[in-house]
Image: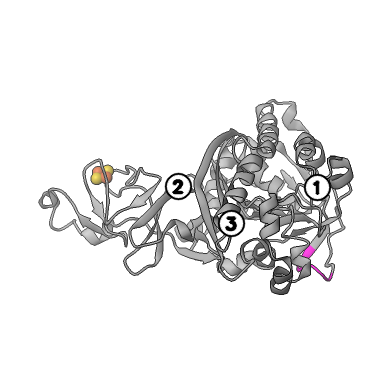
């Protein structure tokens, strides 16, 4: 395994570009970062009844997520134990059993192998059907309607991984007692660019907004004066923690960029009562967030997304629109369209971000390019407790969450993962 200590210097805010390009590091990342961490799978409303399923990825591993007969959500490796074919090829659906289309091995909703064509052909002594069920994740849990799972039997509970981050997440997903739902399906698109470029930006980077999104902000500007007047001098905070999570948000009670009908629908007094003013005027606003390693969200847009790694140079973005169940139909439509217009695959903000990441990746394999470190020094030493927002926060314009994202990444990359310990 490669020691990444010389590539990540978070004390001085320096990151070596090889972490975005090196194939060997990418493979180590699969075995240590993705194999060890809690990973986002989907929203609970994607599984309403027993037998409902959807397929997704944990790192590059394909998984089936389903609801078994007892109503429990389970996740299995989507690879047949016979010759390794994908058991399910559909994105989502409903079934009574998972039957592999190659030779017909069939598994029940609990992952048990229940039917094998020509089973008499297997040797009586060697054959034990019970040993050939689908591989299941080690832990699965939900938080505020989001499903996470990990292959790591020793991973601390999901709540512990979130820590103070949950306080910020609640500002998005716990605005009223009815909870949230997802609408409009999952939008999926492929981008050139290492997945960390996107995860890091959503965790730490408000800095790009004024420049990268200047035109888009002009379009959405409530006063028509554009980004300089309303955004450039925005005050706000950025939260980060040593588990690699990060979120940044302006602190501005009035100047929001919600879709009009959503803005009108909200009962801000009730939300202040439920969540406290600091959350309504902070993390509920036009912010951004990443839960380590590759789940991100945007509260105002109602966008949740996962950055699936597809080799060092490519990612697949999967994005959902999340909204409050209590929203009437016309408000739901307004929120969904607002999200698509801004952060759908052709959204006016998404286009700016995707182009930046792809542009960075497209020039990142040159020798000379890879001999200079990248700068993550903004706000070094300014992280502190501010008495309002839980945990450690800094100014909104800061690389603090980026530094801690990479510090966590380096820790995992340099530590034998649970499966390596077992192998020793
Ligand atoms: Fe699935 Fe043979 S690979 S039944």
Residue at x 76%, y 47% (from the top left corner)? 205
Residue of label 2: 61
Percent x, y for residue 177?
A: 59, 71
Lower position in the chain sequence, tag 2 or tag 1: 1
What is the CA distance from the residue labelled 1 to the residue labelled 3? Answer: 37 Å
Q: Examine the image and state in which quarter residue 274 appears.
A: bottom right
Label 3, residues with CA under 10 Å away: few <14, some 14-19, many ≥20: many
Residue of label 1: 13
Which residues, given as a range, are shown in magenta? Answer: 387-392
Label 1, residues with CA under 10 Å away: few <14, some 14-19, many ≥20: many
Q: Secondary structure at mark 3?
A: strand
How many marks on residues? 3
Q: Secondary structure at mark 1?
A: loop
Lower position in the chain sequence, tag 3 or tag 2: 2
Lower position in the chain sequence, tag 1 or tag 3: 1
Q: Residue furthest left?
A: 120
In this rendering, the label closer to the viewer, 3 or 2: 3
Q: Secondary structure at mark 2?
A: strand
Instruction: Name the chief secondary structure element in magenta.
Output: loop
Asked if marks 3 and 2 touch (Cβ < 8 Å), the reply is no
Indicate left or right for 309 with 231 as reference. left
Q: Nearer the viewer, residue 104 or 381?
A: 104
Percent x, y for residue 371?
A: 75, 31
């Amino acid at each position: 395994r490669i020691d990444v200590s010389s590539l990540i210097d978070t004390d001085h805010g320096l990151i070596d570009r090889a972490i975005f390009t090196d194939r060997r590091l990418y493979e180590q990342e699969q075995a240590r970062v993705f194999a060890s961490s809690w990973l986002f799978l989907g929203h609970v409303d994607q599984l309403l009844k027993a037998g409902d399923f959807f397929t997704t990825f944990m790192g590059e591993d394909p998984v089936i997520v389903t609801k078994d007969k007892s109503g429990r959500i389970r996740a299995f490796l989507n690879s047949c134990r016979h010759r390794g074919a994908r058991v399910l090829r559909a994105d989502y659906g409903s079934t009574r059993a998972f039957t592999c289309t190659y030779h017909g091995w069939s598994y029940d909703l609990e992952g048990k192998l229940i039917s094998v064509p020509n089973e008499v052909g297997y040797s009586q002594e060697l054959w034990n059907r019970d040993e050939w069920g689908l591989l299941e994740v080690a832990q699965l849990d939900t938080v505020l309607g989001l499903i996470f799972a990990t292959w790591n039997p020793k991973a601390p509970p999901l709540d512990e991984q979130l820590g103070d981050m949950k306080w910020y997440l609640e500002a998005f997903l716990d605005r009223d007692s009815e909870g949230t739902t997802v609408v409009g399906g999952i939008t999926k698109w492929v981008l050139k660019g290492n997945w960390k470029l996107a995860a890091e930006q959503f965790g730490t980077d408000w800095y790009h907004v004024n420049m990268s999104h200047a035109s888009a902000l002009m379009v959405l500007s409530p006063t028509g004066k554009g980004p300089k007047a309303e955004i450039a001098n925005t005050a706000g905070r950025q939260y980060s923690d040593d588990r690699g999570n990060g979120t940044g948000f302006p602190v501005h009670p009035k100047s929001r960029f919600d879709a009009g009908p959503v803005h009108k629908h909200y009962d801000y007094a009730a939300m202040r009562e439920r969540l406290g003013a600091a959350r309504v005027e902070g993390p509920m606003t036009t912010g951004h967030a990443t839960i380590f390693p590759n789940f991100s969200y945007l509260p105002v847009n109602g966008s949740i997304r996962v950055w699936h790694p597809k080799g060092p140079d490519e990612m697949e973005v999967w994005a959902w629109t999340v909204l409050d169940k209590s929203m009437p139909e016309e408000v739901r439509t307004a929120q969904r369209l607002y999200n698509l217009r801004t952060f759908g695959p052709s959204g006016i903000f998404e286009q700016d971000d995707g182009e930046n990441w792809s542009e960075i990746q497209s020039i990142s394999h040159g020798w000379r390019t890879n001999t200079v470190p990248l700068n993550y020094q903004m706000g070094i030493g300014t992280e502190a407790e501010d008495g309002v927002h839980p945990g450690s926060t800094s100014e909104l314009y800061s690389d603090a969450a980026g530094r801690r994202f990479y510090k966590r990444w380096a820790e995992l990359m340099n530590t034998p993962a649970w499966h390596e310990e077992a192998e020793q």
